[in-house]
Image (spheres, helix red, strand yellow):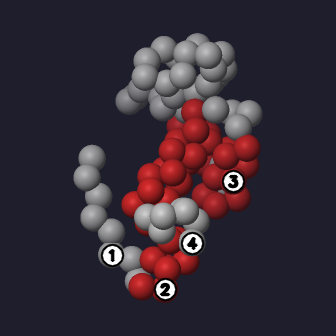
């Protein structure tokens, strides 16, 4: 998915401080990566971060923790995925 963002200059400057090279794109990509880890990994520190930012309603949209193969790190033994439509 491609997303276009209009970010005010002050926010660009603030976000740029989070990356050694000042790349806001790298910062946003890293934030997205951490956010998705907080969704699929129940024990991850990112989960609490997401709950603080968005509340915990998203958890009801996930299947209970179970093995999930695919593109995620196969060494993770307990994670969640979105419920299938109609569940």
Q: Are marks 3 and 4 in contact (CB under 8 Å)?
A: no
Q: Are marks 2 and 1 in contact (CB under 8 Å)?
A: no
Q: Nearer the viewer, mark 1 or mark 4?
A: 4
The reply, left or right, for residue 46 in relation to residue 13 is right
How far apart in space, not on screen, are marks 3 and 4 (Cα)?
Answer: 20 Å
Q: Position of residue 4 (x, y in %)?
A: 27, 64
Q: Which residue is mark 3?
A: 49
* Nearer to us in this view, 48 or 28: 28
The reply, left or right, for residue 52 in relation to residue 75 is right
**Residue 10, numbered label:** 2
Q: Which residue is mark 1?
A: 6
The quadrant holding residue 65 is top right
The quadrant holding residue 78 is top right
Mark 3 and mark 1 lie on one chain; the one further toward the N terminus is: 1
- Residue neighbourhood size for the residue with mark 4, other residues' Cα within 10 Å, grouped as few (<14), some (14–19), many (≥20): few
The residue drawn where x is 53% and y is 37% is 61
**Residue 17, numbered label:** 4
Q: Position of residue 85 (x, y in %)?
A: 38, 30
The reply, left or right, for residue 35 in relation to residue 52 is left
- Describe the element under mark 3 as helix, strand or loop: helix
Whether 15 is drawn above or below 67: the answer is below
Q: Is residue 62 visible?
A: yes
* Nearer to us in this view, 67 or 9: 9
- Describe the element under mark 2 as helix, strand or loop: helix
How far apart in space, not on screen, are marks 3 and 1 (Cα)?
Answer: 24 Å
- Residue neighbourhood size for the residue with mark 2, other residues' Cα within 10 Å, grouped as few (<14), some (14–19), many (≥20): few
- Residue neighbourhood size for the residue with mark 3, other residues' Cα within 10 Å, grouped as few (<14), some (14–19), many (≥20): some
């Amino acid at each position: 998915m491609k997303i276009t963002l209009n970010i005010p200059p002050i926010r660009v400057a603030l976000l740029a401080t989070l990356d050694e090279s000042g790349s806001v794109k790298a910062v946003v990509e890293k934030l997205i990566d951490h956010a998705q880890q907080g969704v699929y990994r129940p024990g991850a520190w990112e989960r609490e971060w997401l709950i603080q930012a968005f509340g915990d309603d998203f958890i009801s949209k996930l299947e209970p923790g179970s093995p999930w193969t695919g593109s995620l790190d196969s060494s993770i033994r307990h994670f969640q995925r979105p419920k299938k439509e109609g569940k």
